[in-house]
Amino acid sequence: MRRIGFVLLFVVALAFAGCGGGLEGTYSDEMGVVTYEFSSDGKVMITGPFGNAVQLDYELEGDRVLVKASEGAAQVLTITPEGHLDIGLAVLKKQDD
């Protein structure tokens, strides 16, 4: 059972890493309060609850996505086995494009 979970996680990570080595698409929480819009060029546009937005760089490291702030700090997102993004306080699901 453990091996199946590892294989599934590996397949999900490969799917995210395809096409230019980056994520693509829009992910948001259930209520649409927070949105992360990823492009395959390593950029993510994050829109908050009041419509404020910021563009940052990101990198994939296995099942983790590192969103880098200009000060050198990084927010760590985890890719779940279902292909969602766990940001700590919420789980973001990919939206239909």
Image (cartoon, grey):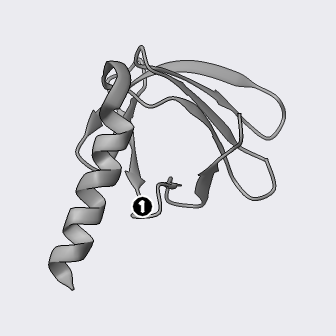
Image location (x, y in percent) of residue 50? 84, 35
Judge the density around disc 1: few (<14), some (14-19), many (≥20) Cα neighbours within 10 Å.
some
Q: Is residue 62 left or right of residue 32?
A: left
Please tell me which residue is depicted at 31% across the width and 34% down the height of the picture.
17
Image location (x, y in percent) of residue 70? 41, 17
Instruction: Please give the count of numbered marks on the rendered protein.
Output: 1
Please tell me which residue is depicted at 18% across the width and 81% down the height of the picture.
2
Task: Please state, as top left, top right, bottom left or bottom right, where the N terminus lies in the image.
Answer: bottom left
Which of the 4 image quadrants contains residue 10? bottom left
Q: Nearer the viewer, residue 84 or 51?
A: 84
Q: Mark 1 sits on what residue?
A: 80
Q: Nearer the viewer, residue 63 or 50?
A: 63
Q: Is residue 59 visible?
A: no
Task: Please state, as top left, top right, bottom left or bottom right, where the C terminus lies in the image.
Answer: top right
Q: Amino acid at mark 1?
A: Thr
Please tell me which residue is depicted at 62% across the width and 53% down the height of the picture.
93
> Is residue 7 shown above or below 61?
below
Say what secondary structure mark 1 lies in: loop
> Is residue 6 shown above or below 47?
below
Q: Nearer the viewer, residue 60 or 12?
A: 12
Image location (x, y in percent) of residue 24? 51, 29
Q: Residue furthest bottom?
A: 1
Which of the 4 image quadrants contains residue 20? top left
